[in-house]
Amino acid sequence: MIDNTQLNQIAYLSKLSIDGDALNATIKDLNNILTLVEQLGEIDTDGIIPMAHPLHMTQRLREDKVTEDDKSKIFQSIAPKIDKQYYLVPTVIE
Amino acid sequence: MQWETVIGLEIHAQLNTNSKIFSSASTRFGADPNSQACVVDLGLPGVLPVLNKEAVNKAIKFGLTVNAHINQRNVFDRKNYFYPDLPKGYQISQLDWPIVGKGEINITVDEDVKIIGITRAHLEEDAGKSVHDMFDNYTAVDLNRAGTPLLEIVSEPDMRSSIEAVTYAKKIHSLVRYIDICDGNMQEGSFRCDANVSIRPMGQEELGIRTELKNINSFKFLEKAINLEVQRQQDILEGGGEVLQETRLYDSVKHETRSMRSKEEANDYRYFPDPDLLPVEISDELLLEIKAQLPELPVEKKARFIKDLGLSDYDADVLTSQKALANYFEITLKDNESNTKLCVNWVMGELSALLNRNQIEIENSPVSAQDLSLLIRRIGDDTISGKIAKDIFKTMWDEKGNVDEIIKTKGLKQVTDTAVIENVVDKIIANNAAQVEQFKSGNEKILGFFVGEAMKATQGKANPRIINKIFRLKLIK
């Protein structure tokens, strides 16, 4: 079951701000989902290959050809801030 | 206390495809910022990734080369984390079902052969590039690199010293270039290394706590960073402290490693299968087809050099260490089949020495393999002496030019006309009565003096073998 600390950790990693009433409501919702999923534990899944995709198809592959040309002017017209063709974001230093 | 070092490497090799792994934008290095980032690479809403066939083929090629199990059904996952150079908020990677499973390669350190296990190799997309020092208060993002196909090659913690780690990394570096899946350019970041390093008391089974070293972009730095980290961990443990499991950045300027993030702050990547991509299935036919296309591998080439050309183990090892070097050597061999040893000596001697001294890769050698081949042929057919050949080689290196033209314009053709040589020999014998006497009284070594004099008199152009013969004939008479 998820508690306060775990929720805050997940919210931090997801860059979401959840506080006040939303906090308790979210914990309750998430725990309901987990309870639902937990029912799967009652089934014997030994020897069953985990499903990677609900469609029973395989990936089609693309030829290795360059067909995209430079549309950066269009893309950069909607960017909040650009300079010298770079996208600018507030300083991030690890 | 005696400590044992344990090292595992994660190598990121950019696959040299034309287009990106999930989009049809170009992967060319050095283009204007963001000019090669399309809607898929930018992670705009509503786009779908479509997997590049060549990226899959190249990953399989690698797997077959290291005798690895190829997972004929493999799956892409999303690795979630936030960073500006990753616009989607997740990296498409492979977790539980990577394309390449367990394999192994041999490395040789101090003549000991050691097997290094390869845990796995998986396909993933590269992130963009962040530039932190270009603008005040802003980080600049270039997404040209975003979506470039990467093969992440993960080794077992089988290495016990920085030398072993470097040898392994160089071996993988050589392999990916042999099979032409990666250009191996470390300056441009096409081939990157992270090292997991820990130490434990000698004899202890259980592994110590490891740190991960990042930001290593040369083999020299790999060795230095590992040695530095081993010393740091040893100092901590011997001082009674504990090593923290963390990621550390190597700073080659300050020659230090510093903490980047600890385990507590480490990202929980929340992997899950990517619903945008279906599982990849690789047919038996494709595996056979790729197997048939594999070029001669270094191990096979080395064995052939030893068996067919009679090379020593050492010479064969050096000459097959790089594909370009092996190719160069094989070109010089053409029409010089009876002079294999001469070719070996020239490629590993004069040529390698000049390349090293000038820090030039063999691919960019000022003297082409064809030209060196001709030079060696001219030594073989007695047109020039070995000594003159060295001078010609120097001229070819500095000024370019064809071997035969240099011989002709500089008048370097070896004198093989016995009448001319006899004339020279007669004069030397006449002028050096004392030495002639010594020879006649049994001093064979004095012959070297006569040959030297004759070479001097002909400016090195006379054939020493013929000079020697004529002196003997005349002195013994």
Image (cartoon, coloured by chain):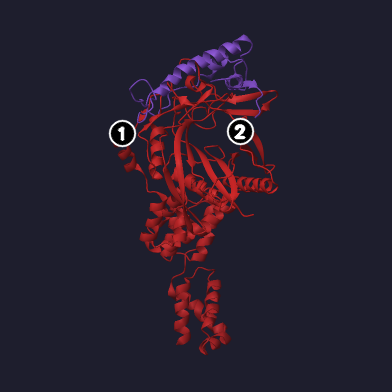
Chain colours: A purple, B red
- Label 2, on which residue? B263
Task: Please give the name of the residue rendered at 55% of the width and 37% of the height, measured from the top-left corner.
Answer: B189
Q: Chain of mark 1?
A: B
Q: How far from the left and from the top, in percent, is residue A36?
A: 45, 16
- Mark 1: secondary structure: loop
- Mark 2: secondary structure: loop
Q: Quadrant of the N terminus of chain B?
A: bottom right
In terms of depth relative to the viewer, which is nearer, B454 or B195?
Answer: B195
Could you tell me how far apart the alpha carbons at marks 1 and 2 are, in whole angstroms?
40 Å
Q: Quadrant of the C terminus of chain B?
A: bottom left
Number of callouts: 2
Q: Do the residues marked 1 and 2 share a common chain? A: yes
Q: How far from the left and from the top, in percent, is residue B193?
A: 55, 40
Q: How far from the left and from the top, in percent, is residue B236?
A: 68, 45
Q: Amino acid at mark 1?
A: Ser
Q: Amino acid at mark 2?
A: Lys
Q: Are marks 1 and 2 in contact (CB under 8 Å)?
A: no
In terms of depth relative to the viewer, which is nearer, A7 or B51?
Answer: A7
Q: Is residue B28 left or right of residue B296?
A: right
- Label 1, on which residue? B283
